[in-house]
Image (cartoon, grey):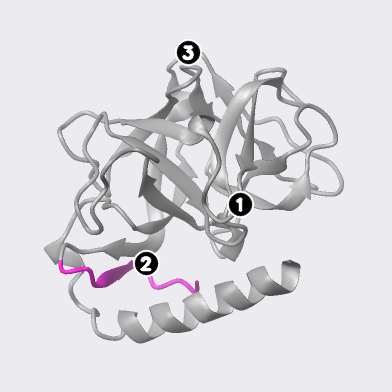
Amino acid sequence: MELIYTLRVLIKSILFVILWSKCEGRESEFNYVTCGSLVKLLNTRHNVRLHSHDVKYGSGSGQQSVTGVESADDANSYWRIRGKPDGTCQRGVPIQCGQAVRITHMTTGRNLHTHHFSSPLSNNQEVSAFGENGEGDDLDVWRVQCDGSIWEREEAVRFKHVGTDAFLSVTGEQYGNPIQGQKEVHGMGIANQNNYWKAMEGVFILPSQEPLRHNHEEL
């Protein structure tokens, strides 16, 4: 399975590089996060990017762990913005403030997920990556909270979990081995400065369905 995931990521990377070459210089044309976009999400309070990897929690649910990392270059920090299972999210259409979405980890194909397990360090609500090939359950759905009508790329937003009302958050707790130095990501019931996220590096899908590369990072 690990070999299959690696091959999938390699193929996607090659395709993105080919498509990106057609889109250089178009960044000013579109300023929103859109359905299908592949992004890194930065917690603005603690300056870490949302991250996952095929490392399971040793407690709680035992599902794939989700953390925050300081590095801007880690390919395991890419997430795809998708519609909820029974909703419409047309590729390239801007995400509306208040819209329910799924956030799918590119490398492992699992969805950002939370549930009523305690997180290992802070005893807040555990956040994990769940499902297979982008399909999990109804606890994979998050609502985008922003100030206007559309999620702007330069705007810090919150993600509120539809099933439990928890906000995706980081409060600074740090793991030891085997993920030394990574920060705990968890759900909190209170809206505060710890749960603001901003779209950073990524591939932003335009309404023409061509991807727009932002911040010239490797994928």
Q: Which amino acid does the dot numbered 1 rest on?
A: Glu
SS at circle 1 = loop
Per the model, the C-alpha gap separating discs 1 and 2 is 29 Å
Magenta part of the chain? 208-219
Residue 61 locus on image (x, y percent): 75, 30
| Residue behind mark 3 | 190
Residue 33 locus on image (x, y percent): 27, 51
| Residue behind mark 1 | 132
Q: In screen coordinates, is 31 left or right of 20?
A: left
**Residue 211 is covered by the magenta coloring:** yes
| Residue behind mark 2 | 215
Q: Answer yes or no: do the residues labelled 1 and 2 have beta carbons within 8 Å?
A: no
Farthest residue to the front: give it. 86
Q: In screen coordinates, is 32 left or right of 130?
A: left
**Residue 177 is covered by the magenta coloring:** no
Q: Which amino acid does the dot numbered 3 rest on?
A: Ile
> Do we see residue 23 in this rendering?
yes
Residue 162 locus on image (x, y percent): 42, 23
Farthest residue to the top: give it. 190
Magenta stretch: helix, strand or loop mostly: loop
In this picture, is 31 found above or below 156?
below
In this picture, is 8 found above or below 85?
below
Q: Residue at x 39, y 73 (%)?
A: 216
